[in-house]
Amino acid sequence: MSTKKLYLVIQQGGSSREMYVHAHGTLTEARKDRKSCEKASYQTTEPILVPAALATVLLSNMDACGDFYNVMESTLRLAAELI
């Protein structure tokens, strides 16, 4: 099993309905990305740690359904239910 990690930062875009997901290999990179977004007045989440094994599953599901946004929406809804 891989010990690699993926850090996601979800950024609100130019309108309240636009969302972007930025993926980073380190927490430091994710934090730098957040600061850059904040300077441009974009709201972001804290970096979200995603173990590589889970990221692989998410990516394979995206390949199967072909729709990144639907997969991300489903993932976020599930995460919200777990909190």
Image (spheres, helix red, strand yellow):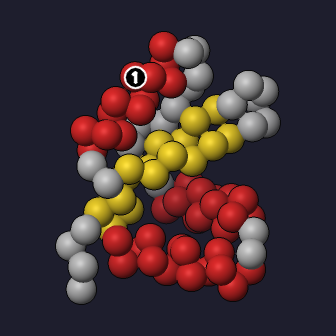
Side (left or right) of 55 relative to 67: left
Vertical placement of 70 versus 33: above or below? below
Q: Position of residue 34 (x, y in %)?
A: 42, 29
Q: Residue at x 49, y 80 (%)?
A: 57
User: Residue at point 27% right, 44% down?
Assistant: 27
Q: Is residue 1 visible?
A: yes
Asked whether, in this view, residue 66 is left or right of residue 75, the answer is right
Where residue 1 appears, as percent x and y from the top left, is 24, 86
Residue 62 image point, x, y percent: 65, 75
Residue at (74, 80) in percent of width and height = 65
Q: How many numbered marks does the figure carry?
A: 1
Looking at the image, is 37 positioned above or below residue 25? above
Q: Nearer the viewer, residue 6 or 78?
A: 6
Instruction: In the rendered view, tell whether residue 20 sits above or below residue 42.
Output: below
> For mark 1, does the 10 Å Cα neighbourhood hold few (<14), some (14 to 19), or many (20 or more) residues?
some
Q: Residue at x 75, y 69 (%)?
A: 67
Inspect this view and state whether residue 81 appears.
no
Q: Quadrant of residue 66 in the image? A: bottom right
Which amino acid lies under the numbered mark 1 shown in the image of this protein?
Answer: Lys
Mark 1, secondary structure of its residue: helix
Q: Which residue is mark 1?
A: 35
Where does residue 44 sit, x and y in percent of width and height?
A: 52, 32
